[in-house]
Image (tube, helix red, strand yellow):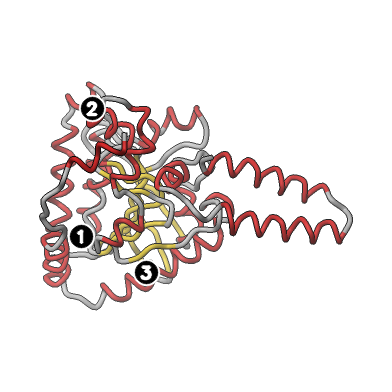
Amino acid sequence: MDILEKEKRLDALEEKLAQLEDDSAIQDLRIEIEDYKRQTMQNLTAWDRVLLARHKRRPTARDVIDNVFNTFVELHGDRLYADDKAVIGGIAEIEHQVVTVIGEQKGRNTEENIERNFGMPHPEGYRKARRLMRQAAKFKRPIVTLIDTPGAFPGIGAESRGQSHAIAENLYEMSNLGVPIISLVIGEGGSGGALAIGGANQLYMLENSIFSILSPEGYASILWKDASLAEQAAEVMKLTSYDLREFDLLEGILEEPAGGFQRDPKPVYRDIRTTLVQSLAHLSQKSPFEIKTGRYAKYRNMGFFQRFNYENLKGMV
């Protein structure tokens, strides 16, 4: 039983709680709900975390911006082709610190997802992000990015307008910026679509977010020729926040309530705000040269080589 099936049981219990009037029955049911959360909703598989990262009620980048920052003025367009609504960005304030915020934005329903292209940016979205990054560097503003995308949009139009080039330009731009960059994965962190705004000095992940080279379905299709094996793929891809922390790729994991970010966002918003304020205070003490060289060193030191035994995969499919 995956996390979404478990969540239906929890929703039923909470709906029943709202209808009770007897105090003793309410107390007993509250205890049952807490026990259920502790015993059932917290022992999650990698696939459970994939489903939570994609949850239709999971707060979006705009939700985080509205609840974490004091003010936000959105800026639009790439000054070349169009305004991609899968990427939002602008100038924000947090604890009297002015920053540039860039986020990948999904929708709440089918209509919004069509408008936001299901959170999959076009090249003009990445060019908008690059324009805002350059503006931030010009005015010496730190940059905060919120990652939540299945990946860059792979359509013919996007490719013909230079999708891969736009991503590469962003990676190049971020490597040379003399202002701090802090990235937070709030949902899905898919492939180059995530990396294009993720070249940060400090990288954080929400507990049930994921960061991977591609989707588990894509991985299973390529490796095993069967997208239905996505659940098994998620286990071997090492895409959870805990996997990335084990590889020493993160500065930290921000905990979520039992059942995911969407069940009780307020404490998560507080933790995000606290983390950003502390990170900005730490990075603001560094010179532009230290910011750039520190970012360079972070990525140069990632990973290690080892011989992998592909025979180990045979027992998994």
Residue at 66% across, 44% down: 11
Residue 301 seen by the camera = yes
Task: Please provide percent x and percent y for residue 133.
Answer: 23, 53
Residue situated furthest right in the rendering: 22
Work out whether residue 173 or residue 120 is closer to the camera in this orientation and state it: 120
As drawn, the label of residue 137 is 1
- Percent of width and height locating residue 283: 26, 72
Name the amino acid type tagged 2.
Ala
Element class at badge 3: strand
Q: What distance separates the C-alpha of mark 2 from that of mark 3? A: 35 Å
- Whole-percent x, y for residue 248 in the image: 25, 64
Element marked by disc 2: helix
- Residue closest to the eye, 248 or 265: 248
Asked if the residue under mark 2 is in contact with the one under mark 1, i.e. CB atoms within 8 Å, the reply is: no
Q: Earlier in the sequence, mark 2 or mark 3?
A: 3
Q: Please tell me in which quadrant of the rendered image residue 287 appears.
A: bottom left
How far, Cα to Cα, is label 3 from label 1? 15 Å
The one of 4 and 60 positioned closer to us in this rendering:
4
Taking the spot 51% from the left edge, 57% from the top edge, the residue there is 67
